[in-house]
Image: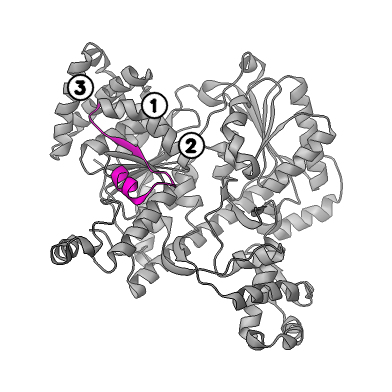
């Protein structure tokens, strides 16, 4: 049985935190994978019996089993029978019968685990089994995914399965009206994105105001009738969530809270951001300010504060206050030094649009907080929207902890084992692949300088292209993908670029990425939700060749990219080609990387070795620890706001 959630409880502290960590280690010692594989084998043993049933008889079996879940009379035997029935329905409706490992993964999800299943192992089909059981319980089941396209695609693809099992299914889309959203949430199974479901929760909370708990809502509805606001909410509760790409949604995006805000026109404030950009350009690094590369912070020196005071004196107004002018200029310096066009953002239709660091996708509905977005806009001399008034906010971490039942699946969960337990109290289970993985993973190839690295990457691409092998080359930013594109053009190598600027062609580009000699340069957006299928004869030549041009700050993202090769037992090859000038090591291991840069100088030869390779592991480990502290900080901020501002009520 899936465990009950802890709701919005705060993170444990002190000895409680130490005890909780110890409990997490004990949880991971349980051999869950073998347990679920054994149960899955028992499910497969029912195949012959169910295969003999007519469609009508199979529907009747669905109704019988559904009654047990609806009335809360579920047992391990009933659950196994339910999975066997759904597995047979999968085969009859969409022509795919889940393998042993897919059934084991479904069992793990139903039991409240975050399940690691390798790329190409069929997670969408796997989810039909626990989702159907969730729908049969009668309170609804949300399947959370990363974008509207995947939500719509998966709902349409699996609709026949759910309908056969007597369930309704829907998909939430960004452009849906409230009435349509309300109807979609009433479906037994609702596909939606993390952003949409969280925003709907916040809007419902704003609609209900200070009403806390079911009794208060019922009394208000009796007294005030339809005008109470209870008739305008769209969600019916948070009973059950199955999170696809769980590490992306629950870890990578957790550091940014979702905020409901409104316009607050302030021409004077907008002008102040422009003036701050002008003033910051007149300050000099080292003399006037110091940079902290690891934490992306700027500190004004005493000389810098004095210089700023002199520069700001003629402006008058708010610039007369030392604290306010220093805050504005520090923000402007942060935008100038740490936020780069083509990396953290792009310019579209005269506006700054954030690029998701982990997926490479555009986020036109997001803004950086505390005036940073306005500072970046001022730096680029584009339209500046005034900071908005915040009506409500909640982090994804806190929101998903409100579900009574939560579980998920992803291709890379093991690295997040500790965090999944500490934040969500869910263990991680690694499910083996249906066929052995034969991908060749070459050790990192390290170069002293960025130019030497890029030259080596182009040569590697040329060699693979001449062999007729398809290549997927991963970059960390839009700027890096376009830089490599220019190098490939100069080398006379035809290629496709997939990044936030041309994401509309994603499906088209990915569909052809496995063909002979194909070169695809992509940001991390090519790493999730879609499979690269090999063209005819490519497997015999060696399969897809994956090249990472940098190591990411999260090792899971690297593994997502490498996992594009060698899917479902196919051959493949993966390697990272990196340099001592990469941001990861410069930011998170500055002393050791600086020493190695001085030692190797500007040599263009490969300098791979135990020390240079270890440097990247050390830097990545430090980056992951820092990111975890930041995510916990966001969650504690939410807890503080809940306690002192009383907005986000705990669901009982």
Q: What x and y, as percent, mark residue 154?
A: 41, 33
Does the residue at mark 3 contact the one at mark 1 (Cβ under 8 Å)?
A: no
Classify mark 2: helix, strand or loop.
loop
**10 Å neighbourhood of mark 2: few (<14), some, or many (≥20)?**
many
**Could you tell which of marks 3 and 2 lies nearer the N-terminus?**
3
For the rendered model, the colour scheme is: one colour
**Which circle marks residue 411 in the picture?**
2
Left or right: 166 in relation to 73: right
**Could you tell which of marks 3 and 1 lies nearer the N-terminus?**
3
Magenta stretch contains residue 180: yes
In front of the other: label 3 or label 1? 3
**Could you tell which of marks 1 and 2 lies nearer the N-terminus?**
1
In front of the other: label 3 or label 2? 3
Please identify the quarter of the rendering in which residue 172 is found: top left
Q: What x and y, as percent, mark residue 561?
A: 59, 37
**Which circle marks residue 101 in the picture?**
1
Q: Is residue 35 visible?
A: no
Pick the residue in front: 455 or 279.
279
Classify mark 3: helix, strand or loop.
helix
Query: Which residue does the image show at 48% across and 42% down from the upper left?
Result: 147
Q: What x and y, as percent, mark residue 24?
A: 37, 51
């Amino acid at each position: 049985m899936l465990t009950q959630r802890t709701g919005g409880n705060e993170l444990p502290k002190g000895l409680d935190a130490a005890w909780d960590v110890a409990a997490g280690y004990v949880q991971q010692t349980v051999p869950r994978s073998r347990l679920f594989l054994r149960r899955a084998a028992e499910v497969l043993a029912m195949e012959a019996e169910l295969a003999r049933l007519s469609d009508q008889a199979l529907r009747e079996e669905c109704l019988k089993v559904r009654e047990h879940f609806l009335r809360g009379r579920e047992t391990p035997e009933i659950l196994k029978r339910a999975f066997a029935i759904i597995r047979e329905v999968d085969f009859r409706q969409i022509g795919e019968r889940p393998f042993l490992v897919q059934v084991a993964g479904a069992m793990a999800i139903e039991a409240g685990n975050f399940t690691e299943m390798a790329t190409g192992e069929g997670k969408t089909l796997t989810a039909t089994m626990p989702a159907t059981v969730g729908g049969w319980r009668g309170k609804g089941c949300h399947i959370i995914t990363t974008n509207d396209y995947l939500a719509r695609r998966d709902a349409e693809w699996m609709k026949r399965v759910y309908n056969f099992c007597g369930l309704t299914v829907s998909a939430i889309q960004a452009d849906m009206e409230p009435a349509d959203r309300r109807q979609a949430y009433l479906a037994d199974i609702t596909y939606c994105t993390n952003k949409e479901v969280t925003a709907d929760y916040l809007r419902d909370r704003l609609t209900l105001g200070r009403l806390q708990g079911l009794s208060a809502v019922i009394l208000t509805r009796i007294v005030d009738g339809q005008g109470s606001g209870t008739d305008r909410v769209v969600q019916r509760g948070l009973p059950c969530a199955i999170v696809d790409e769980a590490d992306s949604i629950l870890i990578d995006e957790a550091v940014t809270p979702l905020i409901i805000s409104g316009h607050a026109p302030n021409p004077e404030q907008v002008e102040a951001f422009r003036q701050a950009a002008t003033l910051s350009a007149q300050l000099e690094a080292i003399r006037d300010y110091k940079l902290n590369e690891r934490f992306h912070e700027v500190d004004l020196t005493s000389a810098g504060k004095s210089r700023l005071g002199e520069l700001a004196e003629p402006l008058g107004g708010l610039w007369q206050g030392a604290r306010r002018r220093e805050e504005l200029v520090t923000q402007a310096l942060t935008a100038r030094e740490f936020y780069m066009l083509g990396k953290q953002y792009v310019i579209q239709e005269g506006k700054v649009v954030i690029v998701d660091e982990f997926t490479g996708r555009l986020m036109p509905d997001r803004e950086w907080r505390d005036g940073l977005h306005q500072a970046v806009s001022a730096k680029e001399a584009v339209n500046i929207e005034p900071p908005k008034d915040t009506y409500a906010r909640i982090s994804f971490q806190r929101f998903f902890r409100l579900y009574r039942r939560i579980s998920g699946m992803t291709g890379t969960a093991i690295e997040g084992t500790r965090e999944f337990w500490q934040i969500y109290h869910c263990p991680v289970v690694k499910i083996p692949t249906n066929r052995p993985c034969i991908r060749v993973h070459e050790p990192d190839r390290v170069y002293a300088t960025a130019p030497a690295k890029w030259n080596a990457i182009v040569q590697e691409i040329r060699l693979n292209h001449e062999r007729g092998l398809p290549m997927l080359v991963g970059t960390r930013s839009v700027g890096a993908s376009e830089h490599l594109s220019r190098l490939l053009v100069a080398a006379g190598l035809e290629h496709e670029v997939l990044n936030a600027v041309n994401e509309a062609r994603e499906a088209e580009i990915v569909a052809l990425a496995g063909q002979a000699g194909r070169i695809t340069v992509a940001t991390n957006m090519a790493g999730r939700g879609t499979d690269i299928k090999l063209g005819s004869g490519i497997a015999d030549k060696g399969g897809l060749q994956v090249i990472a041009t940098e190591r990411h700050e999260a090792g899971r993202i690297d593994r997502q990219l490498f996992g594009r090769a060698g899917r479902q037992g196919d051959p493949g090859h993966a390697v990272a080609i990196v340099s001592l000038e990469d941001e990861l090591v410069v930011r998170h291991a500055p002393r050791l990387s600086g020493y190695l840069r001085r030692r190797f100088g500007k040599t263009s030869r490969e300098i791979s070795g135990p020390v240079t390779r270890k440097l990247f592991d050390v830097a990545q480990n430090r980056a992951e620890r820092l990111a975890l502290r930041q995510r916990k900080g966001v969650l504690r901020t939410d807890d503080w706001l809940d306690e002192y501002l009383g907005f986000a009520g705990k669901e009982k």
